[in-house]
Image (cartoon, helix red, strand yellow):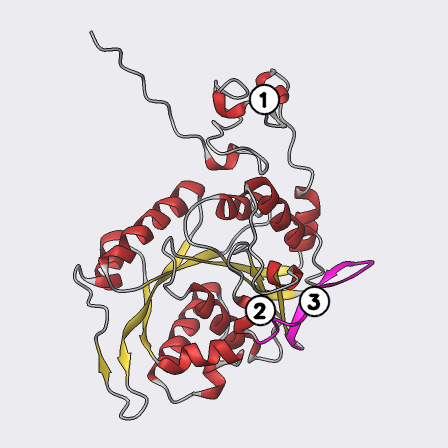
Amino acid sequence: MLAVQQPTLAPDPLSVPSNAPEHCPGTESELAGKADACNGCANQEICASNTPKGPDPALPFIRERMSTVKHKILVLSGKGGVGKSTFTAQLGWAFAADEQLQTGVMDVDICGPSIPTIFGVAAEQVHSSSSGWSPVYVQDNLGVMSVGFMLSSSRDAVMWRGPKKNGLIAQFLKDVDWGDLDYLVIDTPPGTSDEHLSVVQYLKESGIDGAVLVTTPQEVALQDVRREIDFCRKVGIRVLGLVENMSGFVCPGCKTESQIFKPSTGGAERLAKETGIQLLGKVPLDPRIGKSADYGVSFLDEYPDSPASHAYLDIIDKIKCILGGNSTQ
């Protein structure tokens, strides 16, 4: 007779401490502090006891910092290489085009921080004062924070486990002097893991306005985006909409479009219908987007007549409308 192991329920993502090891069963689980994954964890003793678990001590400080931020937006995907950071940058530049708006961009892609390069501030460093860390300012009303500013070289690998990543994200939220912001756009790495759970946990009390999910047309990307949608629903994040990036190719000369990544299963349009999520728009490929990112300049300002620029601005207008802001056009 074969012994059958009973399946265990997946832990509530928000019950997993920020400094927990991989495979943590969660503080609410009957296995808390007793599972094999708990061995060596700093929280093992308190989790195994019947003592009520206190809140993360960073939360009051984060709540105070975030009280001056009107809107908080996550840029997610689940898949790498779909253009999340590029979209985040265009979103930040478009918001900051209105001089009356204060915008911040927080890069929580700890192992692959590309935001400093895309904004043209990779050589800058973070400065601290009595009020906390100062963001690096791209322009007067656009500040950026990233681990990339803290590396001695752009070639340095960041080899951190979850607890250290989570600790830095907490510092970005509680120690950075963001000031009064209209928008804080948070660029995330691929997946649904440490960084994503930390942001959700730390901003639970302050509130996240929603997430923009970026994909490319092919099914291999859409599969991961479906997982990201599931993640958002499980942790209670509102999905503002889907963006299909690299949707066709724009010839810089004749301005005509052709398909590079064929939407074999219907692309983001079909996914939006299946899930009941709004399709915010489709951004065609334009080689000058990559060029602008390499040189750290705003693609929207450099190439305003590109079909990709028009697509970006239409999408950003929809996001503003959803959040109750004014149009960029």
Instruction: Provide the residue designation for mark 2.
Output: 116
Instruction: Provide the residue designation for mark 1.
Output: 47
Residue at point 48%, 76% (across, down): 293
Label 2, label 1: how far apart the Cα atoms are: 39 Å
Where residue 277 sits in the image (x, y, percent)? 31, 57
Would you call the spot at circle 2 few (<14 residues within 10 Å), some (14-19), or many (20 or more)? many
Report whether 155 appears left or right of 11: right
Label 3, label 1: how far apart the Cα atoms are: 39 Å
Q: Earlier in the sequence, mark 2 or mark 3?
A: 2
Q: Mark 3 is on which residue type? A: Gln
| Most foreground residue, 41 or 11 | 41
Where residue 32 sits in the image (x, y, percent)? 52, 21
Instruction: Provide the residue designation for mark 3.
Output: 125
Q: Is residue 11 above or below residue 305?
A: above
Determine whether the residue tagged by mark 3 lies in a helix, strand or loop: loop
Residue at point 58%, 38% (across, down): 18
| Most foreground residue, 52 or 259 | 259
Q: Mark 2 is on which residue type? A: Pro
